[in-house]
Image: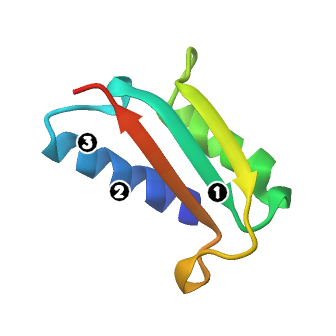
């Protein structure tokens, strides 16, 4: 699933910067289809247990390379 891969990639980037998911203070999720919202939430919760960072989620017309999801994050390092 693309959501799982995006979050794994995020973890590697955070690790390279000396941080972890716990350092994330805000995420922005862009979805190609809001019908995927429930499944994304289920996967997201595995990486960001409560209290999760602030988050915005939007449906967009298209994402590069026909991706279904893109996640941007801000971390306090």
Q: Is residue 63 above or below residue 1?
A: below
- CA gap between label 1 and label 2 equals 16 Å
Element class at badge 2:
helix
Split into 4 quadrants, where in the image is the C terminus?
A: top left
Q: Most extreme residue toward the top, as rendered?
A: 51
Q: Position of residue 44 (x, y in %)?
A: 58, 40
Residue at which label 3 appears: 14
Q: Position of residue 28 (x, y in %)?
A: 57, 44
Residue at which label 2 appears: 9
Q: Left or right? Give the position of 27 relative to 62.
A: left
Q: Position of residue 37 (x, y in %)?
A: 77, 50
Q: Is residue 46 above or below residue 70?
A: above
Element class at badge 3:
helix
Split into 4 quadrants, where in the image is the N terminus?
A: bottom right
Examine the image and state in which quarter residue 61 appears: bottom right
Q: Residue at x 69, y 76 (%)?
A: 62
**Is the Cβ of the residue at disc 1 closer than 8 Å to that at disc 3?**
no
First in residue order: circle 1 vs circle 2: 2
Q: Is residue 65 above or below residue 36?
A: below
Residue at which label 1 appears: 30
How dense is the environment of label 3, judged by Cα within 10 Å: few (below 14), some, or many (20 and up)?
some
Element class at badge 1:
strand
């Amino acid at each position: 699933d693309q959501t799982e891969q995006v979050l794994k990639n995020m973890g590697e980037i955070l690790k390279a910067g000396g941080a972890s998911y716990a350092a994330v203070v805000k995420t922005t999720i862009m979805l190609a289809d809001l019908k995927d919202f429930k499944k994304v939430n289920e996967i997201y919760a595995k990486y960001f247990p409560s209290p999760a960072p602030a988050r915005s989620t939007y449906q967009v017309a298209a994402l590069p390379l026909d991706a279904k999801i893109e996640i941007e994050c801000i971390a306090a390092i």
